[in-house]
């Protein structure tokens, strides 16, 4: 993790140096400030959209995992935009735009599902996820009440 952070810092310095060489010191500072202002405006707008979507989904009684994840990604994008540097600004803007945020959401949710399954297996032992449905039993002539039948298939386990 420390190596990744060190590489990120070197990449940010190289990007600022390259932009500074191309447009000068004042131009670089102007671009960094403009990115912060535009990014904060975009973060507020997209955050409000995510909040409205969350409230609407919650009132409808549906699962709001998509809306919660969108809100988290918008917040992360806002933090990245406020961090000085061009690479963080680009990553933050990508998290603000709905098409790229949808890709990040899918990757995030897939990763969290794997981690949740791994955590559950460590705490309780192996867990089996089954996709199934209860099928009403066929009528039988015996006096005992027949038990319902569950048909399904193992998805993960």
Image (cartoon, grey):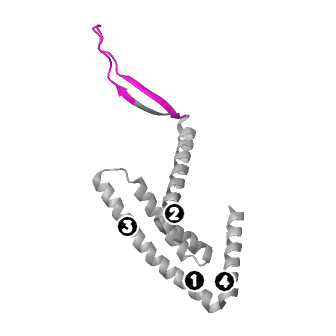
Query: Which mark, by number, is residue 19?
Result: 4
* Residue 5 horizontal side relative to residue 132, left or right: right
Q: CA distance from mark 2 to mark 4?
A: 25 Å
Q: CA distance from mark 1 to mark 4?
A: 10 Å
Asked whether the beta carbons under mark 4 and mark 3 sit within 8 Å of each other, the answer is no
For label 3, count other residues whose C-alpha is less than 10 Å away and answer few (under 14), some (14-19) or many (20+). Answer: some
For label 2, count other residues whose C-alpha is less than 10 Å away and answer few (under 14), some (14-19) or many (20+). Answer: few
Q: CA distance from mark 4 to mark 3?
A: 33 Å
Q: CA distance from mark 3 to mark 2?
A: 16 Å
- Asked whether residue 118 is drawn in magenta, I would say no
SS at mark 2 in the image: helix
SS at mark 4 in the image: helix
Q: Earlier in the sequence, mark 4 or mark 3?
A: 4
Q: Is residue 120 above or below residue 147?
A: below
Measured as percent of width and height from the top left, residue 146 is found at 32, 15
Q: Earlier in the sequence, mark 1 or mark 4?
A: 4
Q: Residue at x 44, y 28 (%)?
A: 152
Query: Circle 3 sits on which residue?
Result: 49
Q: Nearer the viewer, mark 3 or mark 2?
A: 2
């Amino acid at each position: 993790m420390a190596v990744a952070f060190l590489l990120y810092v070197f990449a940010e310095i190289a990007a600022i140096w390259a932009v500074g060489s191309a447009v000068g010191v004042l131009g670089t500072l102007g671009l960094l400030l403009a990115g912060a202002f535009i990014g904060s405006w975009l973060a507020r707008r997209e955050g409000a959209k995510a909040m409205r979507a969350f409230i609407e989904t919650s009132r409808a009684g549906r699962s709001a995992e998509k809306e919660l994840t969108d809100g988290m990604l918008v917040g992360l994008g806002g933090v990245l935009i406020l961090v000085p540097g061009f690479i963080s600004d680009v990553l933050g803007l990508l998290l603000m735009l709905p098409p790229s945020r949808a890709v990040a959401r899918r990757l995030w949710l897939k990763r969290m599902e794997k981690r949740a399954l791994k955590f559950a297996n460590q705490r309780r032992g192996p867990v089996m996820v089954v996709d199934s449905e209860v099928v009403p039993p066929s009528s039988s002539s015996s006096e005992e009440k027949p038990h319902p039948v569950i048909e399904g298939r193992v998805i993960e386990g």
